Image (spheres, rainbow, N blue to C red):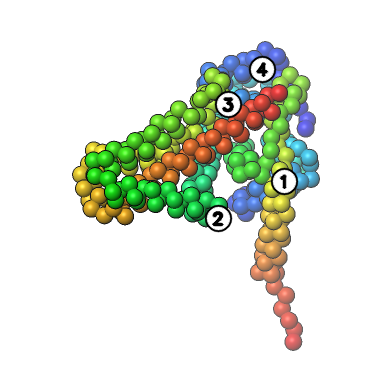
Amino acid sequence: MERKNEITEKQLIFLEEFLSKKYPNISDETRIELIDHLVSDFETTSENENLSQYLSNELEFTKKFVLNKVKIIESNYTKNVWQEYFSFFTTIKRIPITAFVFFIIYVLSKNMNDTFVILTFFISVFGIYGYSLYLPTKNLSKKLRKTPQVQTLGKGITMGIPYIMSLVVIFSEIKIILLESKVFFSLYWFFAFSLGVSVIIVTQKEKKIIENNYKHLLN
Amino acid sequence: MGNQKLYKGSLQTIILKLLARNEKMYGYEITQRVKELTKGELQITEGALYPALHKLEADGLLDVEVAKVGNRLRKYYKLTESGTKETANKLAEMQDFLETMQRLVNPKFSLE
């Protein structure tokens, strides 16, 4: 690649500071890629050496670059949670456990009085919700906690569903309708609980990957 | 410059093929290599390239590596094992597509 000019040390520091101010929470990996792209493009295409002018022309790209990365991380996380959830019904090894959990939930719903059922439901689902918020940052360095990869964990629509489902049961009259059929309530409970468990499993897996990637990337 | 829309659906295949040919590449290098190979006929914009690269990475088809180059760090992409398999699948799909298109735009009529 033919270079029209070469970035100076001073300009590189300026670029790094500019990105840190504009996007303080981007991951090191995203920052490294963005800086390298901007510098390569600046060196190849800019006739003059005015970096500020070049950066103002590239503002839209920089914004899209950062936002797209976050969007991909979020959609990938959501996809992984649903895949994990469906594996409870499709993986041979997991089917007996799935059936057993549903059986326990059904027995509890059928044999306990309604107040106790609601309380157990709330503790089990809301407990998972609370844990899913705590788990991503548990034993993690401060620097990693701020990255979008970690910020996405335990959040989004997949954990929002069990959260809303538990609140609906506690604070609305829907519980009366739900409790009319013990099978239906068991299915409702099982769905909220198992989706929450999927979030926990995926969060744990993703956390390991993020930690490994960072060790490997920045070694 | 040709119709960029025709190339749009092939972006992932192009990236995978380039990475199969070169052990590792960085984003800007990919855009320049495509421009060079197609003599400017196809220009991959950075706005299209990076989301595609990040998607392939998130799908586990690409692995990344960071190396120090001059006064800065550079993120390189390389194929994973499943990325290599997927490249073969995508290229076979592309071959089928090109043959079908060829039959459609340039049919050989029998003179019987």
| Real-space CA distance between mark 4 and mark 3, rounded to the nearest whole angstrom | 18 Å
| Real-space CA distance between mark 1 and mark 4, rounded to the nearest whole angstrom | 36 Å
Horizontal relation, residue B33 to residue A122: left or right: right
The spot of residue A99 in percent (x, y) is 44, 53
Which sits in the foreground, B11 or A162? A162
Q: Chain of mark 2?
A: A
Question: SS at mark 3?
Answer: loop
Question: Dot 3, crowdedness within 10 Å: few (<14), some or many (≥20)?
Answer: some
Residue at left offset 44%, top offset 51%: A100
Q: How many marks?
A: 4
Horizontal relation, residue A184 to residue A103: left or right: left
Residue B14 visible to an observer of this rendering: no
Residue at left offset 67%, top offset 65%: B101
In the picture of the structure, the residue carrying the numbered disc 3 is A27
Do callouts 4 and 3 mark residues in contact (Cβ within 8 Å)? no
In the picture of the structure, the residue carrying the numbered disc 2 is A92
